[in-house]
Each structure stands twice: as structure tokens, then as C-alpha cells.
Image: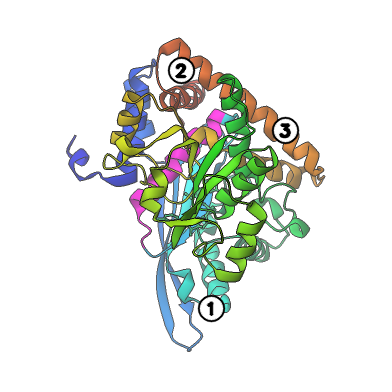
């Protein structure tokens, strides 16, 4: 296939993961080809009036992979290096993540090529509103439901929800998830991804008959996801021995206090010079001896350059796509299990689904109910993946992919083609 030679990075990894899973399952060639492609890729121009009065034109995208199982679902990312190929990988991953968790959505992802750190609050608001207006023809409560991702947050979602509602002529809270609570957000959504990762580590340790108390955990990227993992694991008695941000990391084999870390970060904007800890680089953080390594920053962090230096007993993927295909193979050969992103970090999209369901009912659940349902779904997913992994003799990622792809393929088959 001529396209293959030009495919690189996250998109190549996503396609390889699909192709690898297809070899361990019965996937008809035509459906395999359909799944390697996209339902829709929309590029929009986003003109924004800047604070200095000049007009600047940004580029935005919405990539929709597959909606055989339900409306498209996926985040909105603001990043200066955003590419369609990255969004394709992320959208495809959303299809598998929703399918594996049993959430009735398909996969999508979108965003705007911009550096939000150089934009004022008013500029960000205008950019968000114009981007929402531009993608309005392809989104909708039962069509495609955006959510926050890197550099977007609940305020971004409130602007998107308002823009969509004002242009529709009625209030439409279910158009996005990850909204503030007072406009239809769900309790438990903010910490859902981190809680889900902590619950997945709990499930994994139960199977390994390992105690959580004293478990040594390293977390790369102590942001929304990483810090929530740290908070929940600290509460269960785990020892967080190293954390980092883009400015570097810190290490103390005796453990770091989550509350003290958060206080330090709020005051200093980094973890550098945290008391009673050694400063380390992000590269060396990944190579520390520990029980569990949680990469929770960006994609492509564990590569063929460092995979043979990883000393963790298990890797649990908090970020999307932190391990390359080559690194996956090296870790498998070294018998270091990798709990894949589509299983480990599904907590966010699961609670997003709960938020969408609550918005549809106009009836809101207490946090205990949200977390209990999340716990049950993740437990079931973990057991299913482990079962397929043991039955077919494949690693956890391939097992998760087999389960996820099968459900989407079955939905495509039973629906048939129309028109
Ligand atoms: P965030 O921006 O809140 O946190 C990211 C953290 O990583 C920050 O501390 C940042 O300083 C750090 N970082 C950035 N580059 C780094 C590098 N090269 N080395 C070390 N640290 C670095 O983002 P987030 O919402 O926590 O998302 C983190 C990852 O989790 C992303 O890959 C995202 O796609 C994925 N994810 C997020 C959610 C969610 O609900 N937020 C859900 C699923 C997956």
C-alpha cells in the first residue's frame, strides 16, 4: 500500500495496533480496511479578532473515525504542533476506548493549531466560540459530543456549550462533556481519569497478589491526570517516589507527600527545588526502579531508545499513546506488562458518558453513584482483557484491542451498508 511509507508517529502506532489485533481475531478484510479509514475529516478556518484589533486566522479540525456503536465522542486539543495525523490516531483510539468500556459512542478528536499560552482569556474565548460555530454542522448531542483535552478545560466546554446553544435557539447541555457542574457537568468528572487509573492499578495488583501499601509508584507528568492518580494512590497507602512536569522531576525513594507537592507546584509553577527530594530529568525518571510506572504526560515517551532501561515491574499508561510499537515489543520480551491506555485511562470517557446520560435525563447522580458505576465498569473491562490475554496468549494491549475492535466490527456487520 503506497500510503504506508508516509505514515509516521502516533498514526503509524495506531494503525499497527489495529493490524496486530486483526491477526489474532477473525476480522473480515473489508471491515479491517473500513476501520483503517475515517468517516469524516473536517478542516475549518477559525478567524479571530485579536486584542490588538487585527484579525488572525487559525486552523481547526474535527476528525470522526467511526460511529457504528453510537455518536462520535472525543476531546478538543489546543496545541501549536497539532496535526491531522495525531488527531486521526487519537480519534481511532477513542473508538476502541469507548467500545472496550461498553460506552455507546464512536471515536472522534478535534482541535485548533494554536499556542494557548500566548493568547489572552478573551482571545481564547473568541477562538473557542468561532471554532465551535465552524464545526457545528458535524457535532450534536446525538451526533458528536466534544470534551476537554490537552490545553482545554471546563471553561472551554462552557463556551462551546453556550455557542452551540445560542446558535440552536435552545439550551443544549449534552453537546459537550467535562462542563462545570452548574451547567450540567457531572460530579466526579474532574478526577475520573486519574481515579480510573488508580482503580486499574488496584485491579492489576489484586491479580498479582501484591499489596498496595508501600507500592512504589513513579508518575511522569503530574498534571490533571497524573496528580489525581497520585492523590488516590497515596490514600490507599502507595508510595509516590517520583513525579515530574515539563520542567523536570524529583525523586525520593522514601515517598513524596501529594499535598505538599500540590502546594509547592501552586506556589512555584514546577516541582524543582521541592524539599527533601533529588532533582532528576524526565528521561531518568522513566528509568527509576519502581513497582509501577505511570506515564501521564504526552505520547511517545517510552521508545526503542529507553525501553530496555525501564526498571518498573509494570507500566500503566495514563497518557494516550506513551509507548511506541518498538518499545512495546522490547517491554514484552523483558516480561514487563503494559496496561494499555484504552483500558487504563478510560475513566474520563466513562464518566463523560455518565454526564451525557445525566444531561439527557435532567437528573443528576451523587458522586458515590458515579464512582461506584465507574469502578464496576473498569473492573469488568480489566477482567475481560486479562481473560482474552490468557486465553489467546497475547499481551494486554492486543487483548484489549481484540475485544474493542470485535465489538465495532460486529456493529458494522449487523447494521450493514446504507445507502
Ligand atoms: P495536563 O496538561 O494537565 O498535564 C500534563 C502534565 O505533563 C503537566 O504536568 C506537564 O507539565 C507535563 N509534561 C508535559 N510534557 C512533558 C514531558 N515531556 N515530560 C514530562 N512531563 C511533561 O494534561 P492531562 O489532562 O493531565 O493529560 C495528560 C495525558 O493524559 C495526555 O496524554 C492526555 O491526552 C491523556 N488523557 C487525559 C484525559 C483527561 O481526562 N484529562 C483522559 C484520557 C487521557
- Write the residue at 39% across / 55% down: 281
Please give the label number shown on residue 389. Answer: 2
- Which is more toward the observer, 141 or 399? 399
Eyeballing the image, is 330 above or below 168? above
- Which is more toward the observer, 252 or 49? 252
CB atoms at circles 1 and 3 under 8 Å apart? no
How would you rate the neighbour count of disc 3 (Cα within 10 Å): few for under 14, some for 14-19, many for 20 or more? some
- Which is more toward the observer, 29 or 77? 77
Q: How far apart are marks 1 and 3 (CA)?
A: 39 Å
Please tell me in which quadrant of the rendered image residue 39 appears. top left
From the image, tell me which residue sits under label 3. Answer: 373
Give the x, y percent position of residue 380. Answer: 63, 23
Q: How far apart are marks 1 and 2 (CA)?
A: 48 Å
Q: Which residue lies furthest to the bottom in this view?
A: 52
Mark 3 residue CB less than 8 A from any atom of ligand 1: no
Residue 386 in view (yes/no): yes
Mark 1 residue CB less than 8 A from any atom of ligand 1: no
From the image, tell me which residue sits under label 1. Answer: 120
Report the predominant secondary structure element of the magenta stretch: helix
Q: Residue furthest top?
A: 391
For discs 1 and 2, the disc positioned in front in the rendered view: 2
Quadrant location, the C terminus: top left
- Which is more toward the observer, 389 or 293? 293
- Which of the two labelled residues, at mark 1 and mark 3, occupies the earlier sequence position? 1
- Write the residue at 60% across / 29% down: 102
Mark 2 residue CB less than 8 A from any atom of ligand 1: no
Q: Give the range drawn in magenta.
A: 81-100
Q: Is mark 1 on a helix, strand or loop?
A: loop
- Write the residue at 55% across / 52% down: 139
Q: How many marks?
A: 3
How would you rate the neighbour count of disc 1 (Cα within 10 Å): few for under 14, some for 14-19, many for 20 or more? few
Amino acid at each position: 500500500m503506497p500510503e504506508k511509507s508516509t505514515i509516521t508517529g502516533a498514526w503509524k502506532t495506531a494503525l499497527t495496533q489495529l493490524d496486530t489485533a486483526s491477526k489474532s481475531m477473525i476480522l473480515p478484510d473489508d471491515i479491517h480496511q473500513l476501520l483503517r479509514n475515517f468517516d469524516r475529516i473536517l478542516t475549518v478556518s477559525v478567524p479571530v479578532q485579536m486584542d490588538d484589533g487585527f484579525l488572525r486566522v487559525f486552523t481547526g479540525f474535527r476528525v470522526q473515525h467511526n460511529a457504528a456503536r453510537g455518536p462520535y465522542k472525543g476531546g478538543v486539543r489546543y496545541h501549536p504542533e497539532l496535526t491531522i495525523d495525531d488527531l486521526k490516531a487519537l480519534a481511532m483510539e477513542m473508538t476502541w476506548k469507548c467500545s472496550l468500556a461498553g460506552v455507546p459512542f464512536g471515536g472522534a478528536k478535534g482541535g485548533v493549531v494554536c499556542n494557548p499560552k500566548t493568547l489572552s482569556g478573551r482571545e481564547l474565548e473568541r477562538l473557542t466560540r468561532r471554532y465551535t460555530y465552524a464545526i457545528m454542522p458535524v457535532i450534536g448531542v446525538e451526533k458528536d459530543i466534544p470534551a476537554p483535552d490537552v490545553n482545554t478545560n471546563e471553561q472551554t466546554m462552557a463556551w462551546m456549550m453556550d455557542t452551540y446553544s445560542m446558535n440552536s435557539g435552545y439550551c443544549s447541555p449534552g453537546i459537550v462533556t467535562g462542563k462545570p457542574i452548574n451547567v450540567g457537568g457531572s460530579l466526579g468528572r474532574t478526577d475520573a481519569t486519574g481515579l480510573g487509573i488508580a482503580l486499574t492499578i488496584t485491579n492489576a495488583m489484586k491479580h498479582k497478589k501484591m499489596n498496595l501499601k508501600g507500592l512504589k509508584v513513579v508518575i511522569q507528568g503530574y498534571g490533571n491526570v497524573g496528580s489525581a492518580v497520585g492523590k488516590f494512590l497515596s490514600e490507599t497507602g502507595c508510595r509516590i517516589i517520583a513525579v515530574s512536569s515539563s520542567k523536570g522531576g524529583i525523586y525520593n525513594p522514601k515517598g513524596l507527600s501529594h499535598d505538599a507537592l500540590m502546594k509547592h507546584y501552586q506556589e512555584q509553577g514546577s516541582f524543582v527545588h521541592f524539599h527533601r527530594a533529588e532533582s532528576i530529568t524526565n528521561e531518568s525518571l522513566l528509568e527509576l526502579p519502581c513497582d509501577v510506572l505511570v506515564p501521564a504526560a504526552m505520547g511517545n515517551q517510552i521508545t526503542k531508545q529507553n525501553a530496555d532501561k525501564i526498571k518498573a515491574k509494570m507500566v500503566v499508561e495514563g497518557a494516550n499513546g506513551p509507548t511506541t510499537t518498538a518499545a512495546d515489543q522490547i517491554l514484552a520480551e523483558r516480561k514487563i506488562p503494559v496496561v494499555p491506555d484504552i483500558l487504563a485511562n478510560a475513566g474520563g470517557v466513562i464518566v463523560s458518558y455518565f454526564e451525557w446520560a445525566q444531561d439527557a435525563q435532567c437528573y443528576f447522580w451523587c458522586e458515590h453513584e458515579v464512582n461506584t458505576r465507574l469502578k464496576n465498569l473498569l473492573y469488568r473491562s480489566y477482567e475481560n482483557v486479562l481473560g482474552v490475554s490468557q486465553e489467546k496468549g497475547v499481551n494486554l494491549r492486543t487483548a484489549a484491542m481484540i475485544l474493542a475492535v470485535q465489538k465495532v466490527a460486529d456493529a458494522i456487520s449487523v447494521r450493514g451498508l446504507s445507502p
